[in-house]
Amino acid sequence: MLELRKDIFADERDDNLKEVGRPTQRQDMLGHVTGTSAYYDDHRFANLLHLKVLRSPHAHARIRSIDVEAAARAPGVKRIIRAADVPVNLNTLLSLIQFGKDDEPSLASDVVRYQGEPILAIVATSERAAREALALVRISYDPLPAVFDVEQALKPDAVSVNPAYPKNTFEYHGKYDHQKLRFGDVEAAFAQADMVLEDRYQMSPIEHAPTETNGSIAVPDTNGRFTVHTSTQALFFSLDTAAKINAMPSNQLHFIGGTVGGGFGGKVDTLTEPLAILAARLTGAPVRYRMSRHEEMQFGSPRGAERIYIKDGVMRDGRIIARKATAYFDSGAYTRLSSYAVVKCVAHIPGPYTIPNVHADVFCVFTNRTPATAMRGFGVTALDFALECQMDKDAVAIGMDPLEFRMLNAYRDGDMKAHRREAKNCALIECAQVAAEKANWPLREEFRRMSSRTARPGARAAPPQPVSPQSARAPQRISYERPAVSAPRPADTPAPPARTEPPAPPPGATHGARRFSSVFGTRRR
Amino acid sequence: MKAPIQFRLNGEETATFADAGANLLDVLREAVGDLSVKGGCWQGTCGTCTVLVDGAPRLSCITLAESCAGKSIETVAGLRRGADLHPLQTSFMEHFAAQCGYCTPGMLMAAKALLDRNLNPTRAEVVDAICGNICRCTGYEPIIAAILEAARLEASLGANQRRA
Amino acid sequence: MSVTVKTFARLEEAAAALSSERGARFLGGGTLVMRALNEADPAITTIVRATDPGLAQITVSSSRVELGAGVTMAMILAERELAFLHPVARAVGGPAVREAATVGGNLFAPSPYGDFATALLALDATVTLAGQGARELPLEELLGRRDRGVSLVARVAFRRPASDTFRFAKVTRVRPKGVSVLSIAAQLPLASGRVAGGRVAYGALERTPVRAKAVERALEGRSLDRGAIAPALAAAADGVAPVDDAIASAWWRREILPVHLRRLLLGEAT
């Protein structure tokens, strides 16, 4: 039963809700229960060919030699596709909005950087024939040392994973090796805090495991175009990516999606369409590239693992006066969407709480693992897990009820956030109050009367005083030596809000890229 | 080398040719053209491909097609009763027991296998009936509720109304 | 190249076909072989099937049970005389798997599968191989050499246990159906309330189901109450070498073994 608490913020409501609160039947429900919802594979084509990919068994290796002679002669094989056949064999997904360097090949040529990386594709008259031909490929490797741990990867002597980013971190705006958030002076605040609590949180990679695996069918069309039936969650995104990799004008591609058999973020990486289209071009036949369940589980991109360190300075009266977060995203061997996840993460720190001193460094790190991708709030959900566990520990440490502790520290309207924006339309306090009511969780009277629209009892977080313009900005960290923890950092002073524009897009670019302010960190105008 | 195979599919005599060693899922989808059966793993672990063979639930992806010669196969394409939906279908709709819909055909057939022999299942029996079917979207509760409701609906229909 | 499927009316013919060709595999219920076929396992070139009605036969007398190797878990569940085996059959897969999974197939299922084989080991079952006359060999012997050579099981047999003497527990993370982290089967006949000639077997612990002989010795002559079983619990992991795999670590298996053994012996919920 859905309950609408319209009594809360009643004076702000314009109560014209027509759909919210009313159950509405899904438009595809009848199709689902009759088995007529069409997934990408629910189309039949004469002379359909099947594409299977040869994958690296090594996490990091140089390919010494490849011999496809026996495979090419195997029954049913129509074409073997190699790295040299791919028109644009280096791409990064967010190049579509000019974010990041092209770093990932569709087919590896000299080096493989994660176990499962595709090296070549075999197109055959049946999946069985393709699999049997794969087994006939003679390939030899020289294994290389590999790195699997995010902090190991940042050491100066670490194995270099990704040639586009030799120091194993994504580069923001062409020069920064991480995302940074600075507000106030955490070290001074830690010195004043009644308690300082520090902990480390670690997530594993999580596989979406949709019941329908990733796949697509590329079909030559009558007018020289290609129709692509795909499982993608992101039709235009995948179309543009496939067009770029195939060096085709995008108007030569007709992408048909429709029902996705479970995506959750795992069907945005456009892993099958580019090669399926290339295979259709090279053979003149419809080609299906369907991931097996094993491929989906083992090599389909997961939500990346994250390691998050949180250090809080807390007063006995319940105020958090400092929060320092250092987070490492395991992007795997290539960028995909992790660069963006990191921006989201740093935008989410320190959580929905007014904390006068905040310091965060968030890194997008390359390791020799399966490249990670989006999944259900990636960049934020794991961070929230870490933050909220930390909140509970803080509350226990000072002997305060964990819900009251959150309410005390919650954003209120008008508070200055660490990102130098004023908090607006806050509602954490009201949500906590209703949750407590539903759960019969006792709250003290003052907490039952709290409001997001009034100041917190005690000192409200005042915006930090701007420093004189002559103060040096803390130098950007571009080496991997970590500064000694003991000495307080030179003033990580809050600089005036950043008004710098990102580098101008290359001439001729027509994307509305600047509207993606969350990616570039500029304000929406 | 393809060999002929003949069986009854949703009440209709059906014949096609199948490769030696072909599984029933691929024969139904690729050769016969019944796309209502879905494949999730081709390993016999997810239940997506569940069909009924002589009334028993079977994983079509690990069933040798030729072992079904002469048998009666039911898929979700045959679940409707003429123009009307089967109570399971109606109930799934009303209980929002599907989101992406990919597990739904297999779930419906697993549920049908239960209701065809037990019109008064306990919740535990419903859970057991679908325990071989993975759903990544709904969290299963709406599906369990839908099946229990469908059992009540079915039980209230006369035996004649239960046939198409 | 595609595989060849050969179907024989008599089990002996199937056995002959099986041993005459390296790439031949016997198709029981298909839960393992069809999966391998779907993945184009190059080791399989011929599928051998048998329609011999003896394969699906269940014979229960007052003292003995015989199960054809082709008897499925669903058939076991439909047989009221085999109610003591129902917890085992029900623990194998979901309903669709149970319609296919066979007694014979379970004997060769790699760990962590093989729950039914674990039960048969505790029941001191013998197996009769096809094409070798009526010779019965202990299941333990077959398990020891199941990876070598070719064996086609025709049926299994065991002494029918007295009521309430056979117990089985499957330890799994996902209920009701999930792969075993560990399974324990125990056949515990009592004489004057004390264990006499008990057998205990573990599944999903090592590469094949194994007897827990230290536990058997520690239970001999003891009653099944908390104090009396303490030595057996202490010996729970003696003489066994749990494996590390994706399901559980050896350490974990060793840790939980006495807990689940205790629950089984005392009749507590698992």
Image: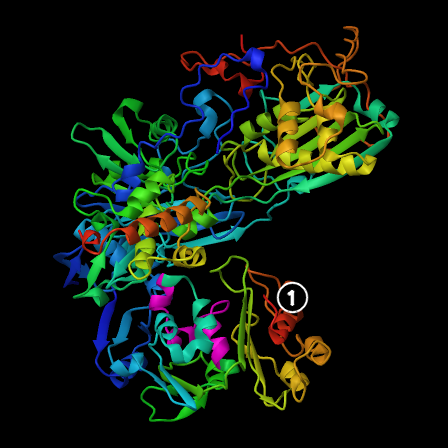
Residue B159: give x, y in percent of width and height.
22, 56
* Residue B85 included in the magenta stretch of the image: no
Label 1 is placed on what type of residue? Answer: Ile
Q: Is residue B68 above or below residue B36?
A: below
- Report the front residue among B114 and C241: B114
Q: Position of residue C7 (x, y in %)?
A: 22, 75
Q: Secondary structure at mark 1?
A: helix
Q: Quadrant of residue A214?
A: top left
Q: Is residue A465 visible?
A: yes
Query: Mark 1 highlights which residue?
Result: C256
Identify the subunit bearing mark 1.
Answer: C
Q: Which residues are magenta?
A: C96-120
Image quadrant for the N terminus of chain C?
bottom left
As for residue C106 lying within the magenta part, the answer is yes
Residue at 61% from the left image edge and 10% from the top image edge? A500
Answer with the quarter of the image where residue C38 lies: bottom left
